Image (tube, coloured by chain):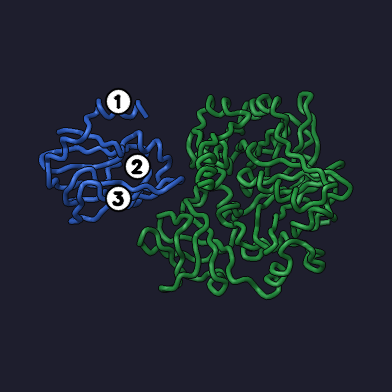
Amino acid sequence: MPTDHIAELLERIPDKLLPLDRWHRAHGGRMVSFAGYQMPVQYEGVMAEHLWTREHAGLFDVSHMGQTVLTGETPDRALEAVVPGDIQALKENRLRYTLLLNETGGILDDLMVTRRARDLYLVVNGATKYDDLAYLRETLPDEVVITLLDERALFALQGPKAAAALASLIPEVTDLYFMQAGAFVFEGTQLWISRSGYTGEDGFEISVDVDHAEALVDRLCAHESVKPIGLGARDSLRLEAGLPLYGHDMNDEVTPVEADLGFAISKRRRIEGGFAGADRVLGELNGGAARKRVGLMVEGRQPVREGAEIFAGDIPVGIVTSGGFAPSLGVPVAMGLVASRHAANGTQLHADVRGKRIAVTVAAMPFVSHRYRRASVT
Amino acid sequence: MNRYFTEEHEWVEVEGNTATVGITDYAQEQLGDVVFVDVPAEGKQFDKGDEAAVVESVKAASDVFCPVSGTIVEGNDVLADEPALVNTDPEGDGWFFKLELSDMSELDGLMDEAAYKQFVAGL
């Protein structure tokens, strides 16, 4: 059977290695398969790394993510055909969180878009990057040139000491506020740095040529506040911060309104529409969606994990999409997709964990407050 | 007193016809930070290979299989409040449960410490 043959071939494709694969192993990283890459899941332990990031600064290698640029006459207007954000209004060196949508309003990916002087710079998820590229190529006009920057590595430096640590190498980064970006020079190489991240903490995401990545990472980790942090803590940090993970809390059958990401649908786009799936998405914005992504506080100490069914009495009303132990809170927390009539904060539900009923309560997110360095409202 | 080991990384300490069961240092190291342990109640009966306990780390949930058949005489209730004992003292205070063995001959199929060390070295 040809399909079996393809599946077999895919299974045999070995994981790719990060540019700093050897560095991670040398620093005690335990490598696991994730998004088609061998990635460090932890160094000294998820709990310690999580708490270190909340108190100091953690360095995450996210080079698996797809750094992509769009060039052409009006790539912003073109991109708006498949995302609900107002990309045309994005000012230079500003970034915006947006969603790549299919024709029925399902989320194909979530991404950051930055307007730079000569292009739009996109950062998409590692596991979806090749599908994203294919979809963009298929949907955007030919005059938009799409380039995957696979010669660049990407690192996130996150935590209350991140700014001081990065400023010890590049003092000018302190000029950036949350969701602002710019080009900086470090030891003769050009970096693209944005003040953004996926932990709820202040921090930066740093794009660097792979040939200069190790020198940068070594210099950052030489700072007393900085330690390398693995995927395990990246997941628990983003869960506490209430940030959804693509492929878990949302997928191509979940709409932006269901995912409670209505903030990513810009005002002008709400009026004008004109993006993939707009009929359904705008309809749900006005009339409500059948289900909603919510936070769940979990009673007791047993974590409730992805895939657990959620019940109101004996009636199934949803599913846990992410869950685990929240190291900063010392209790388990979760996110789930729940029928809208059971999605109000304070609603008492329960999750089925291998036949055991565990009480959960719908709760506001984030579970741990964000500490971004925002510009004052202008 | 005799200590045995399984390929599922449990240790079994036998005294008379009672066995104390826990997970090995290698197992806790692989699991990472343990945040929850569910131990069986007194009187429960298990066959060899049954799921007897659950251990959850920050990363994942794992079943602990009963390495030998028997009846539970005690679960380690301290683990409910101090699951991290499994990390700090896995082969001592972090034990999971004690059971009365129903078939002593099952011990013959388990590894001794030297064999377990060799087994782990080969992983």
Q: Residue at x 63, y 29 (%)?
A: A19
Q: Which chain is blue?
A: B
Q: CA distance from mark 3 to mark 1?
A: 26 Å
Instruction: Write down which chain is painted green.
Output: A
Establish if A176 lies above or below A219: below
Give the chain letter at badge 3.
B
Taking the image as drawn, is residue B84 in sight?
Answer: yes
Q: Both on one chain, marks 3 and 1?
A: yes
Give the quarter of the image for residue A252.
Answer: bottom right
Residue lying at the far front in this picture: please name it.
A1
Mark 2 and mark 1 lie on one chain; the one further toward the N terminus is 2
Q: Residues within 10 Å of mark 1 (few under 14, many from 20)?
A: few
User: Seen from this angle, which residue lies furthest right?
Assistant: A73
Left or right: where does residue B15 sit relative to residue A243? Answer: left
The amino acid on which the numbered mark 3 sits, given as a three-letter code, is: Ala
Mark 2 neighbour density, 10 Å: few (under 14) some (14–19) many (20 or more)? some
Residue to which mark 2 is pinned: B85
